[in-house]
Image (tube, rainbow, N blue to C red):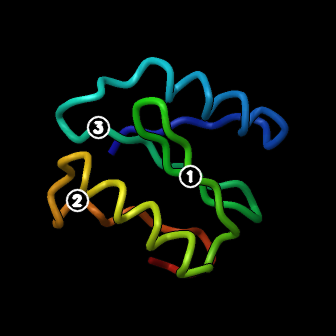
């Protein structure tokens, strides 16, 4: 699976830039983690939550479903939770 690395200080601006360029249709998203937070990025929408916090993940999953992401692709890993 392709990946990328960036400094933690760049996580928020990188997420915003990705949200601005992702296609709004087709269920596209990007996920990445810092040492403390998970970022799940959709077209014009960024979910940011402490890793391992199920309520933050649930919000991102609900949005993913509404954006057309298949259930089988809601498989991003939260660094600390392993899910």
Q: Quadrant of the N terminus?
A: top left
**Residue 42 to residue 68: above or below:** above
In the figure, 26 relative to 37: above or below?
above
Local secondary structure at mark 2:
helix
Q: Nearer the viewer, mark 1 or mark 2?
A: 1
Tell me where residue 77 appears, x and y as whole percent.
46, 67
Tag shown at residue 26: none
At mark 3, the secondary structure is loop
Whole-number angstrom distance, CA of label 3 to CA of label 1: 14 Å
Whole-percent x and y of residue 24? 29, 28
Which mark sits nearer the N-terminus, 1 or 2? 1
Spatial separation of the CA atoms under disc 1 and disc 2: 16 Å
Disc 3 or 1, which lies upstream in sequence?
A: 3
64 vs 6: above or below: below
Q: What residue is shown with label 3? A: 28
Image point (25%, 46%), residue name: 67
The percent coordinates of residue 32 (x first, y second) are: 55, 49
Q: CA distance from mark 3 to mark 2?
A: 10 Å
Q: Residue at x 47, y 30 (%)?
A: 44
Given this view, does label 3 or label 1 mark the residue nearer the observer?
1
Against 5, residue 47 (above or below) is below
Q: Which mark is residue 47?
A: 1
Observer-nearest of 67 and 79: 67
Say which label, 3 or 2, has the lower sequence index: 3
- Residue at x 17% of width, y 34% of height: 26
Whole-percent x and y of residue 51? 65, 71
* Rendered image quadrant of residue 35: bottom right
Disc on res. 73: 2
Instruction: Please give left or right for residue 13 compared with residue 58 in the image.
Output: right
């Amino acid at each position: 699976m392709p990946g990328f690395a960036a400094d933690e200080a760049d996580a928020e601006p990188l997420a915003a830039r990705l949200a601005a360029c992702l296609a709004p249709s087709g269920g596209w998203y990007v996920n990445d983690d810092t040492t403390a937070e998970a970022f799940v990025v959709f077209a014009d929408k960024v979910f940011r939550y402490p890793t391992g916090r199920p309520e933050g993940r649930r919000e991102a999953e609900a949005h993913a479903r509404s954006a057309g992401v298949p259930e089988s692709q809601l498989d991003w890993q939260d660094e600390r939770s392993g899910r």
